[in-house]
Each structure stands twice: as C-alpha cells, then as structure tokens.
C-alpha cells in the first residue's frame, strides 16, 4: 500500500499476519483483511471474509466507530470461498488514528458471533489514470457450457473485442469498443468510466481501474454506492512474464453462489483489464415456460494484443525462446571451435 506512515504500516502488518476467526456452533469464518482508508473520494472500509466451517453464512454486519451498521452485500455463501465488502463512511476520520469496528456474523443455523476490533485509518492509494489516448487492447472471447442464448444476444458469435482509448480527462477514461463477430459484422460502442469513483456508462465498467492499486484497495472508491456487482477489492498482486519483461497483475474475485464466480485481472501499472473469467448457472424456460432447466456456462475475455506492451504472456513464447537460445549457444560454441588454434 502507498503513502502509509511507518508506524501505521507496521501495525497493519501485525494485524494481517493472524487472520481473525469467528466460531459459532458448526459455523466458522475467517476475517483475513480489514482496512480503513482515507482517500480523495472519502473514507472507505474494506473487509474480506472466508467461510471455513460447515454452515453457510446469512449475514455479515459491520459497525465502524458508531456509524449506522451495514451489511456486506457479497457474502461467502459457498464453503471455502472468500467474499469482500466495501463501504463508504460518512464520519470524520484521521490518518494514523485507531477506530473501533464490530463485525457480527449470522450463520444459516441462526447462531451469531461478534468480534470487536480496533483498526487504524490509513491513507488510501491515489487514484490516477494509467492509460493515454491512442492506447488499444484486443480481447479474444470464449463462451462455453450448455447455455442457450437468443440469436440477438450480443455474445452470440462474438469473436474478439477491441477497446481503444479515445479521451482522458481527469480520472475519466472514454473508450470505443469494437465487437467483431464470426460472420464478419461489427458493432461499435462508445462509453466511459471514472477510474476513481467507478461511475460509468453501461459498457465500460471494469475495463479500466486506477493505476498502481494495492491489495486491499477497492477497485473503485465509492463502489458500495453502485450495488452488489461493484463491491470488489484487490485481493492479490502477482507478476506475469511477457516477452518484453515482467508486469504486475492485480486480481479480484466476485462470488454469488455455489461454484459461481467471476475472476478479474488488471495490469497494475496501467489499470487496464487483462482478463475476465466467469462461471455461473442460469435457468432456462422450456415447453412454453412450464419447465425450468439449470444451465451451466463459462465466459472468458483474454487480452491477446495491445499497443502498450507485447502480448501474449511469456509462457506462450518460452519454448520458442528456449529453442532460439539453444541454437545461439551451439552457433557460438562452433565459432569458438573454428577460431581455436591447433597445437
């Protein structure tokens, strides 16, 4: 995380080193992250919880410094799954000061447990745009499973999705999206997203987030105001190898049912999305709506080309690079042999 005082940072490291455990009956849940951050857009509270017991969770309610309690809208209702809550606070908070937090978990067997904990308010990451006009990013699209879509659904036959940055103003990014279909037709959509607040038109949410976000940061500063699907935080940052070097990648995941989830990945230095994978279930009507059948589907967007850096990932190029290196070594060795004088 950025711009933290040394004392606050050390205290938070100690706090995160030992995840807190809630136990009530056969229910058990871990709180693996709790953060109170003051940003340019306001004060944001972030919590990550993981269901580690045998009971499902009905409600996770949080109260910060006596403010009105709120429920996190994404709960880990599948065993072994983590979920994340992000909420905008209205009180007056100061960086470096500790504030009381109470978290109450209610399990499906109606047992309840509460933890009281103090959390230090820290400086949140600065929200800046990481792309510029003229940058473009092309994505392959794969739809799997046994889902039946109407012929006019925008995903039917979609082959690739090209996103071009057409304007940058403050923290607002305007994009032009070209959807190319297998039959050769194309649809062009212009949209925008504010990488700080998350406010956006219908099609641009998630394509860009702020650059250089860290683990625990909400992907957008006021994501709780946008509803369930905007309630995400960065949960991991990992390196990815590309032909022209290593780049850090930010991860977030959204869960909404048993084995139903969406995984998001963004390039950390630019904030541009590099991939989305969604697995879910849906109901379809059959026999004039008199019968419903459960369908399983997967949907994946994968960055395959970009103006900003060389794609794909290094792993795809590794065999070719290894082969090239081998030939180079052999050539160098033979040249040395030819230049070695005979005694």
Image (cartoon, rainbow, N blue to C red):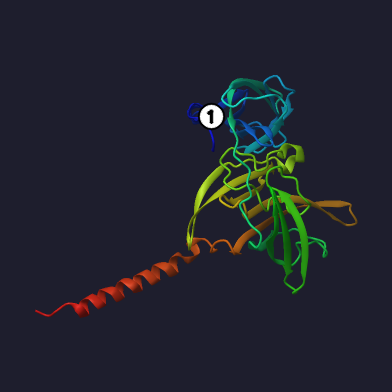
* Residue lying furthest front: 169
Picture layout, residue 148 above or below residue 52: below
**In this rendering, position of residue 317 left or right of residue 175:** left
Q: Position of residue 65 (x, y in %)?
A: 67, 20
Residue drawn 55% across the image and 26% down it: 20
Tally of numbered tags: 1
Q: Position of residue 177 (x, y in %)?
A: 73, 62
Residue positioned most to the left? 343
Q: Residue at x 21, y 80 (%)?
A: 338
- Residue 151 drawn above or below residue 36: below
Closer to the camera in the image, 98 or 233: 98
**Label 1: few (<14), some or many (≥20) within 10 Å?**
some
Image quadrant containing the N terminus: top right
Res. 16 in view: yes
Dot 1 falls on a residue whose secondary structure is loop
Please indicate, yes or no, whether residue 258 appears anywhere in the rendered image. no
Q: Where in the figure is residue 308, as x and y percent of width and height?
A: 57, 61
Quadrant hosting residue 342: bottom left
The image quadrant that residue 336 belongs to is: bottom left
238 vs 220, nearest the viewer: 220
- What residue would you read off at disc 1? 19
**Could you tell me which residue is drawn at 34 percent across and 70 percent down?**
326
On the image, the x and y values in percent for residue 254 come to: 66, 44
Point out the image quarter for the C terminus.
bottom left
> Relative to 101, is 189 on the left or the right?
right
Can you tell which quarter of the image residue 85 is in? Answer: top right
């Amino acid at each position: 995380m950025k711009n933290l005082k040394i004392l606050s940072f050390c205290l938070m490291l100690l706090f995160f080193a030992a995840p807190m455990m809630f136990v009530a009956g056969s229910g058990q849940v871990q709180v693996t992250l709790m953060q109170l951050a003051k940003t340019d857009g306001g004060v944001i509270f972030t919590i990550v919880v993981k269901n580690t017991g045998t009971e499902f969770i009905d409600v996770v309610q949080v109260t910060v410094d006596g403010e009105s309690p709120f429920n996190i809208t994404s709960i880990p209702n599948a065993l072994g799954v983590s979920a994340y809550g992000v909420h905008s606070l209205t009180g007056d908070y100061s960086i470096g000061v500790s504030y009381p937090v109470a978290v109450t978990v209610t399990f499906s067997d109606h047992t309840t447990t509460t933890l009281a904990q103090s959390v230090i308010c820290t400086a949140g990451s600065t929200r800046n745009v990481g792309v510029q006009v003229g940058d473009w990013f092309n994505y392959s699209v794969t739809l799997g499973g046994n889902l039946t879509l109407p012929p006019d659904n925008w995903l039917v036959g979609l082959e690739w999705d090209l996103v071009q940055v057409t304007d940058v103003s403050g923290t607002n990014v305007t994009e032009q999206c070209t959807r190319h279909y297998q039959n050769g037709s194309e649809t062009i959509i212009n949209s925008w997203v504010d990488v700080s607040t998350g406010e956006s038109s219908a099609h641009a949410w998630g394509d860009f987030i702020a650059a250089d976000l860290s683990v625990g940061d909400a992907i957008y500063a006021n994501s709780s105001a946008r509803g369930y699907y905007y309630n995400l935080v960065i949960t991991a940052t990992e390196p990815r190898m590309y032909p022209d070097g290593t780049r850090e990648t930010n991860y977030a995941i959204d869960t909404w049912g048993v084995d139903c989830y969406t995984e998001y990945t963004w390039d950390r230095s630019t904030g541009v999305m590099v991939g989305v994978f969604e697995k879910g279930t849906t109901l379809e009507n059959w026999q004039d709506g008199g019968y419903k059948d459960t369908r399983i589907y997967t949907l994946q967007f994968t960055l395959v080309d970009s103006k900003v850096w060389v794609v794909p990932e290094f792993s795809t190029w590794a065999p070719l690079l290894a082969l090239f290196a081998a030939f180079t070594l052999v050539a160098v060795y033979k040249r040395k042999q030819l230049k070695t004088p005979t005694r």
